[in-house]
Image (tube, helix red, strand yellow):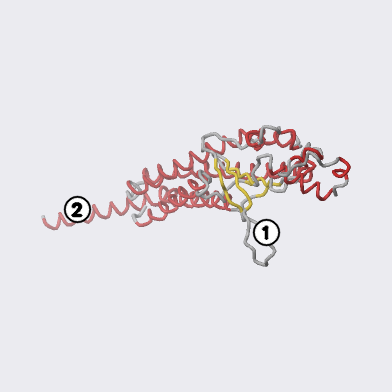
Amino acid sequence: MARLSVIIPVLLSAAAFVMSLFVLLAGKDPNFLPAVYLFRVNTSNIKPSGLNLDYSSIISSLPIPTNDIPKSIIDQVPSSMIDELAQTAAKELGLKDYYYSHIMNYCSGVVVLTGDPDGSGPQPATGNSTKVTYCSPIKGLYAFNPMDIFKTELISNYTINDLGIPSDVEDGAKALAVAYKVMFICYIIGVALSGLCVLLGLTVGWMETRAVAGIVGLLSILTALALGVGAGIATVISIKLKKVFNEYMGSKVNVWADNDGGRFMGLSWAAVLAMVLAMIYWVFGCCCGGSAGMRRRERREQRKNEQMMTKV
C-alpha cells in the first residue's frame, strides 16, 4: 500500500476502536454516557394492582397519624384516591424510577422536576428528563436481571412477590444471560483487535509489502466479525427483553421498557461499518498494493543500477 493510503484505514480502525470502547464502557458511572444503553425499564408509574397491599397498609403508609380513622371512612375513599395512595406506597418500596441496562453493569435514575413555568407548581418532567443517580460497579460477563436488582432495593417489609411481576419476565432475563456474556466477549475482542490494527497500521502499515497488508487485513476481518457479532447480539437482547417487559409487565403493572433512541445501536453498527471499510482497504492493499509496491521498488532498483552503470 502507498504510504499515504495507510492513513485512511488507520483512521477508520481508530474510529471503530473509540466507538466500540464507548459502547463497552457506557454507564460505568453516572457521568459517562449514561444515555447510551441497551434498554431502559420505566418503573416510575408502577400500577397499584401489581402490589399486594390492602387499604389499611396503603393508608398506614401515609406520613400522618391514621390509627384513629374509622374503617367506614376508609371504605368511602374514592378508588382514584386509593390508586394515588397506592402509587405513593409503591414509591416507598425503594425502587427507582428507571433502570438502564449496559454491557458491564446497570444504572438507575429518577424523574427530575421542571420549574414552575405557569405558576401551577412544579410539574413532573416528561420524555428523557431523567437523572442517573447510581451505576453499579462494572464487571466482565455481566448479565442484566431486573428481578435481582428489585430484590436488593426493596425495603425489608416487602418481597418481589408484592410487585405482582409475572415469572415470565425473570425467565426471559435468565434465558438471555448467556447472550449477555457472549456479547461482552465479542466487544472485548473487537476493542482489543481494533486497537492492535491502529498500532500496526501506524508502525509497519506503511511498508509496501503484501505480508504486512495481509496480516493487518486478517486482523481487521476478525475485528469486524467480533464487533458485528457483538452488535447483532446486542440488537437481539434489546428487542427480546423490551418485548418481554412490555408484553408481560406493561398492561399488568404498568412497567415498560424502551430504548435510547438508537444511540447504543448507532455507535455499535457505526464501529462495525468503520472496521469493514478498513478491512477493505487492507485486503485491497494485500491483493493489489503489494504488487504495486514491488513494481515501484523494482523501478527504483533499476534506476540505481542504471546510475551506477553510467558512473562506471
Q: Is residue 1 left or right of residue 83?
A: left
Q: Residues within 10 Å of mark 2 (few under 14, many from 20)?
A: few
Please name the amino acid that badge 1 sits on. Gln
Q: Is residue 146 visible?
A: yes
Residue placed under numbered mark 1 in the picture:
123
Q: Residues within 10 Å of mark 1 (few under 14, many from 20)?
A: few
**Of 97 and 25, the residue lying toward us:** 97
Q: Which mark is residue 305?
A: 2
User: Which residue is at a point 62% across and 61% down the rendered structure image?
Assistant: 115
- Looking at the image, which residue is at 42% across and 52% down? 9
In the rendered view, does 66 fall on the left or right side of 279?
A: right
Closer to the camera, 287 or 167?
A: 167
The residue closer to the viewer here, 70 or 90, is: 70
Give the farthest residue toward the bottom: 118
Q: Quadrant of the C terminus?
A: bottom left
* Residue 240 visible to an observer of this rendering: no
What's the CA distance linking mark 1 and mark 2? 84 Å
The residue at 53%/47% (across/down) is: 30
Q: Quadrant of residue 103?
A: top right
Eyeballing the image, is 266 above or below 179?
below
Q: Position of residue 64 (x, y in %)?
A: 73, 44
**What numbered label is drawn on residue 156?**
none
Residue in the foreground of this view, choosing between 122 and 304: 122
Side of 189 where 161 appears, left or right? right
